[in-house]
Image (tube, helix red, strand yellow):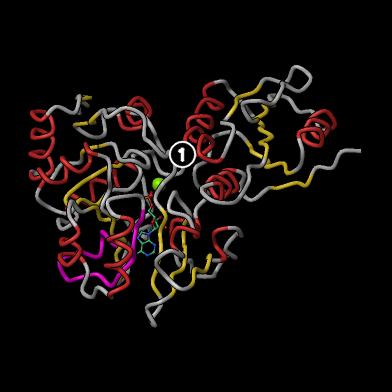
Amino acid sequence: MKTDVLTPTEENLSLAAEKIRAGEVVAFPTETVYGLGANALEPDAVKKIFNAKGRPADNPLIVHIGRVDDIEKVASYVPDIAYKLAEKFWPGPLTIILPKSENVPKITSGGLDTVGIRFPSNPVARRFIELCGVPIAAPSANLSGSPSPTTAKRVFEDMNGRIPVIIDGGECKFGVESTVISIDRSGDSVKILRPGAVTDEMLLEVVDSVVIDGGVLHEIPSGQKALSPGMKYKHYSPKADVTLVKGSYEAYSEYVKNNPKDGLFCLIFDEDEAVDGVPYVTYGKDSETQAHRLFEALRELDERGARFVYARSPESTGIGLAVFNRILRAAGFKIVEAESE
Ligand code: AMP
Ligand code: MG
């Protein structure tokens, strides 16, 4: 299959929307990462997403809508708090999990009775979804297990020959996937299943309490059910063996010097100096720029043939929690506390 990369003109977006209506898969930009979209209500179309990515069938897809009212097309029950959250954070990087309506096939929800719903803010995504006229199921547009793409070039590397169209909307604004939340039965508390750009503090402006699910910071023991199925897979991983190193720059650089390896790269902050001639890639200077850069940095490490990576641990507050969560998974939960002598 030939893969066309199209600029987001009105004509091209109409063409891409036609592909969707014909049951095909189209990659498109959002404010988080690029998505791999298909008609969420059409099982055969959704199956093509799983095939293109090589995604496990029990990992549910997020359904993207183009206006708040469409929430009722895909959810069977919408509590008041969901409308309040939607009013505050939509369009934007927040996915709300609700009981799914019968319209949504089980293949879309990974076999679950619930569905994750999001109304993205990226203007190209909004126009595209509007032109499609159907809810769009879309996971990140990478091959399963590799870092999410934040540019059309990275989507092309993974999806060339697998899908007919990629819409090139430039770099994604945030660079990490959406915040995924569930709402508890009483309706006044939410649980963060996957951290993103909508932070716990922001959510507290609307709800009384926010709980961070254990799966965000800890490995889910084998055999235990993951509330957010994507969290149980080793995810966002470059090919290299990554270790997350906590501590000051001094402690970090001592750790690097004391633990040399063949094919070692450092993953450090913009202002950090190289350690002892070890090659390095940088990923930002604060939580926002780290979110924006992380996945691209992981792909760069692969390109440069890194076999081992010592990653400096980011701050884990605000959007930093999303950065920490992704890098912890890229490291397969290998984390060391470095101390300077
Ligand atoms: P991706 O589309 O690659 O960003 O992954 C979407 C992630 O959202 C999944 O891996 C799940 O962890 C989470 N998710 C989507 N739908 C649900 C749902 N119904 N229940 C729980 N988690 C969900
Ligand atoms: Mg993904």
Query: Which residue in the rendered view is the most extreme toward the front?
Result: 205
Horizontal side, residue 323 vs residue 196: left or right: right
Segment tinted magenta in the rendering? 94-109
Residue 91 screen position, x and y as percent: 27, 51
Q: Is residue 338 above or below residue 13?
A: below
Answer with the quarter of the image where residue 65 lies: bottom left
Residue at point 50% right, 32% down? 293
Count of labels shown? Answer: 1
Residue 164 screen position, x and y as percent: 19, 32
The three-letter code of the residue at mark 1 reads Ser
Answer with the quarter of the image where residue 9 lies: top left
Q: Is mark 1 on a helix, strand or loop?
A: loop
> In the depicted view, which residue is nearer to us: 215 or 78?
78
Horizontal side, residue 90 vs residue 42: left or right: right
Quadrant location, the N terminus: top left
Q: Is residue 99 magenta?
A: yes
* Mark 1 close to ligand 2, CB under 8 Å: no
Answer with the quarter of the image where residue 73 lies: bottom left
Horizontal side, residue 292 vs residue 28: left or right: right
> In the depicted view, which residue is nearer to us: 321 or 205?
205
Residue at point 25% right, 37% down? 28
- In the picture of the structure, the residue carrying the numbered disc 1 is 146
Q: Residues within 10 Å of mark 1 (few under 14, many from 20)?
A: many
Predominant secondary structure in magenta? loop
> In the depicted view, which residue is nearer to us: 146 or 134?
134
Horizontal side, residue 2 vs residue 251: left or right: left
